[in-house]
């Protein structure tokens, strides 16, 4: 049984999620153009490394993943972008296994703790149903829980 995929923390989700080639300056028709799917975490890896100029170790720490996982993500992202540029394909950004925050939540009623994404967990205890749940920032979070 394979290990579950670890959440990749991203800080930037683009508003524009589709980019298409404009052959010879004529962009009237995009029908039939093939697409390359670029995951949100792949774009984040390129943003951190290529735009912000961070080291591989710093990028991995910001995304809360290992250096090897970061390298695998950025290699795949660059392959996809080059393929799109060389083969006149559109780039569609979306999907992936990402979150804005991975948090350690603690129920103030039953005391149970769970590690989950903020978006996935919400504010209800999975064990007792209490709404008195808070982020236990001292345990694992590097940033405050915000969507």
Image: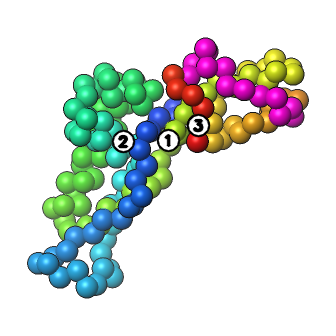
Marker disc for residue 98: 1
The residue lying at 36 percent from left, 53 percent from top is 38
Q: Are marks 1 and 2 in contact (CB under 8 Å)?
A: yes
Query: Where the N terminus falls, by quadrant?
Result: top right
Query: In the figure, 109 relative to 78: above or below?
Result: above
Where does residue 62 sit, x and y in percent of width and height?
40, 28
Task: Report the residue that reaches farthest toward the bottom.
Answer: 28
Residue 62 colored in magenta in the image: no
Where does residue 58 sit, x and y in percent of width and height?
32, 23
SS under mark 1 = strand
Res 68 visible:
no
Q: Nearer the viewer, mark 2 or mark 3?
A: 3
Task: Report the residue that reaches farthest toward the left.
Answer: 24
The residue lying at 27 percent from left, 69 percent from top is 20
- Where are the magenta residues, as a range? 129-141
- Mark 1 and mark 3: span between their CA atoms? 14 Å
- Mark 1 and mark 2: span between their CA atoms? 10 Å
Crowdedness near tag 2: few (<14), some (14–19) or many (≥20) residues, C-alpha within 10 Å: many
Q: Are marks 1 and 3 in contact (CB under 8 Å)?
A: no
Query: Where the C terminus falls, by quadrant?
Result: top right
**Colouring of the image:** rainbow
Res 49 visible:
yes
Where does residue 31 sit, x and y in percent of width and height?
33, 82
Marker disc for residue 146: 3
Which residue has dot 2 on it?
44
In depth, the one of 3 and 35 nearer the eye is: 35
SS under mark 2 = helix
The residue lying at 45 percent from left, 26 percent from top is 64
Q: Return the disc, 2 or 3, that comes first in the chain's sequence.
A: 2
Query: In the figure, 118 relative to 27: above or below?
Result: above
């Amino acid at each position: 049984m394979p290990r579950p995929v670890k959440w990749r923390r991203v800080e930037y989700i683009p508003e524009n999620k589709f980019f298409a080639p404009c052959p010879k300056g004529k962009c009237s028709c995009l029908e039939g153009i093939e697409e390359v799917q670029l995951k949100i975490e792949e774009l984040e890896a390129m943003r951190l490394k290529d735009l912000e100029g961070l080291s591989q170790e710093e990028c991995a720490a910001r995304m809360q993943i290992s250096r090897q996982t970061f390298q695998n993500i950025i290699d795949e992202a660059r392959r996809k972008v080059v393929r799109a540029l060389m083969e006149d394909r559109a780039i569609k950004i979306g999907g992936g296994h990402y979150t804005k925050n991975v948090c350690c939540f603690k129920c103030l009623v039953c005391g149970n703790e769970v590690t989950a994404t903020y978006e996935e967990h919400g504010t209800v205890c999975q064990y007792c149903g209490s709404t008195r749940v808070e982020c236990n920032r001292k345990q694992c979070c590097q940033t405050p829980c915000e969507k």
